[in-house]
Image (tube, rainbow, N blue to C red):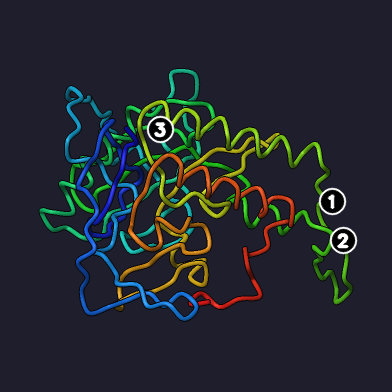
């Protein structure tokens, strides 16, 4: 049977583990809000929680590496999401071969007990994900506030920004004069990007994880055109027009969602495959927004 996820609260955790079989079967009972698609009014089922640990996971306890706060030196802010801020930082004593290394640090601004529990679950989940095309998670710092997660730093930022900067229309101004920047990506480079994302998604599927928000904005680029899947939870703020707001707080990446996810909040490996198809379109259009000629409610 297909693994199904449906109807949970929204949060900033990064992946969603599923077991084979049905989890939380989808219900058509709706609240006062509804998504309007064309002329059809579709009741909104309670918002799915993107990237949350599955309820029925029976995996053994995971050891999460703890990093001392004195070993983390913040350099500059990279972005901010609903959970808190992300910083570029230097981390000492993280690698036996390097005195220090650049990392991305995700902070938790919400100190509530529920948020701390979600933080712990996310850390355990990320520790179990080890793949060359998944952003590496190094560990946590929990001695004091704010709570911190430490990730691999990807020098060139998110893939959407990278694609736009390497498209045929990418220009910068130098002394008021427009100059071509970076150089246009070729077909072989685009295919290389796509195959790396596909490899990461094959791994997630093999581990019974459903991503639920796969898009170029949630992939990161390093040196040598290395691409990895990752989500620091910032994209809903930076790319707010990519998300359809429902009921004042629910944010849906509707342009990347298949019909069954839009209408019934059904998320499976197959819905991730749909999103991957949209990613291919993004790659080959140099980062354009899917269906850019339409408003979200259309």
Q: Position of residue 258 (x, y in %)?
A: 48, 55
Secondary structure found at label 3: strand
For the N terminus, which image quadrant? top left
Asked if residue 57 is positioned above or below residue 113 in the image, the reply reads above
Asked if residue 111 is positioned above or below residue 196 in the image, the reply reads below
Of residues 47 and 30, the one drawn nearer to the viewer in this rendering: 30
Q: Which mark is residue 180?
A: 2
Task: Identify the mark nearer the N-term, 3 or 2.
Answer: 3
Tag nearer the camera, 3 or 2: 2
Circles 2 and 1: CB distance less than 8 Å? yes
Task: Identify the mark nearer the N-term, 1 or 3.
Answer: 3
**Which residue is located at x 55 percent, y 38 percent?**
228
**Which residue is located at x 23 percent, y 46 percent?**
119
- Residue reaching furthest left? 113
Q: Position of residue 85 (x, y in %)?
A: 37, 59
Q: Position of 153 compared to 80: left or right?
A: right
Of residues 264 and 233, the one drawn nearer to the viewer in this rendering: 264
Q: What is the distance, in whole Å, between disc 2 and disc 1 at their CAs?
A: 7 Å
- Residue reaching furthest top? 96
Residue count near mark 3 (Cα–Cα under 10 Å), binned few <14, some 14–19, many ≥20? some
Secondary structure found at label 2: strand
Give the residue number, with chain letter if any, for mark 1.
Answer: 183
**Which residue is located at x 43 percent, y 32 percent?**
204
Tag nearer the camera, 1 or 3: 1
Q: Which mark is residue 114?
A: none
Q: What is the distance, in whole Å, between disc 3 and disc 2 at their CAs?
A: 38 Å
Asked if residue 288 is positioned above or below residue 241 in the image, the reply reads above
Q: Which mark is residue 92?
A: 3
């Amino acid at each position: 049977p297909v693994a199904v996820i449906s109807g949970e609260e929204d949060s900033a955790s990064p992946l969603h583990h599923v077991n084979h079989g049905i989890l939380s079967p989808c219900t058509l009972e709706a609240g006062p809000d509804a998504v309007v698609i064309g002329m059809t009014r579709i009741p909104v089922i309670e918002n799915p929680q993107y990237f949350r640990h599955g309820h029925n996971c029976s995996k053994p306890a995971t050891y999460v590496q703890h990093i001392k706060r004195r070993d983390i030196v913040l350099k500059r802010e990279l972005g901010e999401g609903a959970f808190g801020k992300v910083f570029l930082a230097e981390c000492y004593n993280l690698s036996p071969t390097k005195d220090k290394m650049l990392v991305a640090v995700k902070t938790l601004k919400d100190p509530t007990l529920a948020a701390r529990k979600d933080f712990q679950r996310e850390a355990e989940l990320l520790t179990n994900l080890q793949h060359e095309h998944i952003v590496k998670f190094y560990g946590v710092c929990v001695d004091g506030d704010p709570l911190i997660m430490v990730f691999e730093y990807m020098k060139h930022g998110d893939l959407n920004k990278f694609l736009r900067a390497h498209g045929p229309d990418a220009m910068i101004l130098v002394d008021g004069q427009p100059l071509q920047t970076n150089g246009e990506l070729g077909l072989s480079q685009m295919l290389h990007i796509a195959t790396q994302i596909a490899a990461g998604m094959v791994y997630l599927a093999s581990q019974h994880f459903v991503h639920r928000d796969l898009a170029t904005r949630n992939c990161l680029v390093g040196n040598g055109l290395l691409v990895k899947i990752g989500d620091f939870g910032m994209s809903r703020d930076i790319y707010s027009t990519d998300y359809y707001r429902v009921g004042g707080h629910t944010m849906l990446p509707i342009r990347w969602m298949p019909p069954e996810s839009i209408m019934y909040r059904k998320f499976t490996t197959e819905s991730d495959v749909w999103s991957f198809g949209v990613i291919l379109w993004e790659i080959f259009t140099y980062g354009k927004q899917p269906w850019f000629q339409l408003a979200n409610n259309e």
